[in-house]
Amino acid sequence: MRRFEAIAFALLGTCLFAVAQNLDTTKELIAAEHRFNDALLRADWKMVEQIFAEDLVVTNSDGSVTHKSDELKSVKSGDEKLESIEISDVRVQDLGDVAVVTGKLVEKGRYKTTDVSGSYRFTDVWAKRNGRWQLVAGQETLYTPGK
């Protein structure tokens, strides 16, 4: 009976440790999403550069695909100018050294002369590399709330 109790105790400890790790990852990545949005609002391309992985791939709401260099160029040049970004309904799926963050965002801004204000659903994929989370993929879909 003692062996069974020891195994049960070990399993409980492992489960509690996994839950604690998952909560930490969730907090870290929600904070990372907020840092990312704040950097975009301030047009802080140096912060954006640190957040983006070298192999970043972004699928934009119009179906176009961009990479780190394209995204940084938009921020540096002022082509992308965001006035506000609010995220909600954020969910984090912790897969170890990779995590998927999904949610809603409402933004107000422009890309060059095009108004990009609207409500979006987003999916961001983060990878933990060299001890820090980096954005490796992102996707946004424009939608009409309530539909």
Image (cartoon, helix red, strand yellow):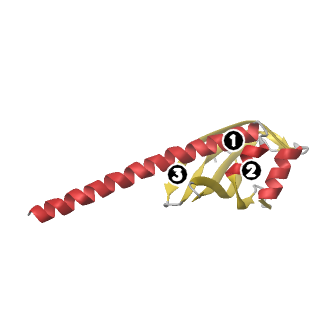
- 130 relative to 64 in the view: left or right: left
Residue 8 drawn at (x, y percent)? 20, 60
**Rendered position, 75 above or below 64:** above
Give the quarter of the figure containing the N terminus: bottom left
Q: Nearer the viewer, mark 3 or mark 2?
A: 2
Residue 141 appearing in the image? yes
Q: Earlier in the sequence, mark 1 or mark 3?
A: 1
Q: Where does residue 146 sit, x and y in percent of width and height?
A: 62, 44
Which residue: 77% across, 57% down? 68
Determine if residue 79 is in view: no
Q: Are marks 2 and 1 in contact (CB under 8 Å)?
A: no
Image quadrant in which you'd find residue 116: top right
Lower position in the chain sequence, tag 3 or tag 2: 2
| Above or below 139: residue 118 | above
**Which badge, 2 or 1, is on the more N-terminal residue?**
1
Return the residue found at the far left.
1
The residue pinned by badge 2 equals 49
Task: Report the residue marked by disc 1.
Answer: 37
Asked if the residues shown at circle 3 and circle 2 are in contact, with their CB atoms under 8 angstroms apart, the answer is no
Residue 102 against residue 41 in the figure, above or below? below
Element type at mark 2: helix
Q: Residue at x 32, y 56 (%)?
A: 15
Disc sitting over residue 145 in the figure: none
Q: Which mark is residue 92?
A: 3
- The residue located at (42%, 51%) in the rendering is 21
Image-based side of 22 in relation to 122, left or right: left
Q: Nearer the viewer, residue 119 or 48?
A: 48
Could you tell me residue 34's position as x and y percent?
63, 40
Could you tell me how far apart the alpha carbons at marks 2 and 1 are, in whole angstroms? Answer: 13 Å
Q: Secondary structure at mark 3?
A: strand
